[in-house]
Amino acid sequence: MSDSNALIADLVCTRISHDLIGNIGAVANAVELLEEGDMDFMDDIRSILKTSSSVLSARLKFFRMAFGLDNANTADLRTVAAVCENYLQSLGSPDTPINLSFGLDNPRYAKAVMLGIMIVADTLIRGGKINVLAHEGKVVVMPDKNARFSEDKAAKIRELVQDGKLENNAQFAPLFYLLSLLRRQGIKMYVVNAGFPGLMFE
């Protein structure tokens, strides 16, 4: 394994752990309350376990498909769309959901699109909508025109895509993994729009 591949693996593991640890801690706290046997907290315990288990399941399924080995699920675009929608629901809240319009029609781009969705979602401020558009052999993942996003994060994404250099920052692990994946698959990626990405694949 090259040094760059090892660093990407380190960053991905760190990012996944970061995205799971909060809800794992919530489950642990709920179990502690159960062990104490105080029935006054039973409604709270049920709510914590239901919410945290749902979030953990959605995120683990997404990470398995986006970062793991290819399997039959990545070839089934309805499954890919459902997994992406559930992942985005785990990030948003009832008041500020993150919605998805999924127009992918070619399984070849499934993992790239999943990672693109993750990258775009990282930039959104207080929810929004992500569009996946496919036309004439090109695929674009981009925030809806009404969505608010972090301009600083968007600028950093543009910089990293243009430079193609790794940084020791797990926040951008999905982007580094995506760039490596695209090189292996022979897919080109461009940042489109003067504001924020669109990430376009062809």
Image (cartoon, helix red, strand yellow):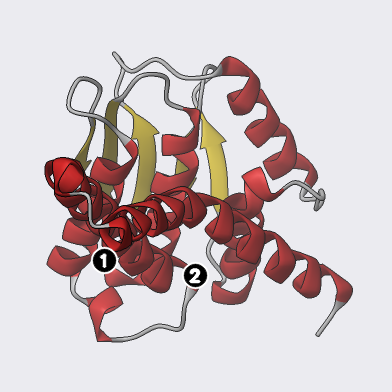
Q: Is residue 175 left or right of residue 115?
A: right
Look at label 2 and name its amino acid: Phe
**Residue depicted at 66% across the width and 24% down the height:** 155
Q: Nearer the viewer, residue 134 or 97?
A: 97
Q: Nearer the viewer, residue 50 or 42?
A: 42
Mark 2 secondary-structure assignment: helix
The numbered mark at residue 72 is none
| Place of residue 171 in the rendered image (x, y in percent of width and height, measured from the top left) | 64, 44
Q: Is residue 95 above or below residue 15?
A: above
| Place of residue 13 in the rendered image (x, y in percent of width and height, measured from the top left) | 63, 66
Quick check: can you spot residue 104? Answer: no
Q: Is residue 45 above or below residue 187?
A: above
Q: Is residue 93 above or below residue 199?
A: above
User: Badge 2 is on which residue?
Assistant: 67
Closer to the observer: label 2 or label 1? 2
Q: Is residue 2 left or right of residue 52?
A: right
Q: Quadrant of the C terminus?
A: bottom left
Q: Callout 2: 10 Å neighbours few (<14), some, many (20+)?
A: many
Number of marks in picture = 2
Look at label 1 and name its amino acid: Asn
Quick check: can you spot residue 90? Answer: yes
**Residue depicted at 29% across the width and 13% down the height:** 146
Q: Quadrant of the N terminus?
A: bottom right
| Place of residue 194 in the rendered image (x, y in percent of width and height, measured from the top left) | 54, 18
Q: Is residue 141 above or below residue 13?
A: above
The numbered mark at residue 106 is 1
- What's the distance in space between the residues labelled 2 and 1, CA to CA? 18 Å
| Place of residue 34 in the rendered image (x, y in percent of width and height, measured from the top left) | 26, 59
Q: Is residue 145 left or right of residue 177?
A: left
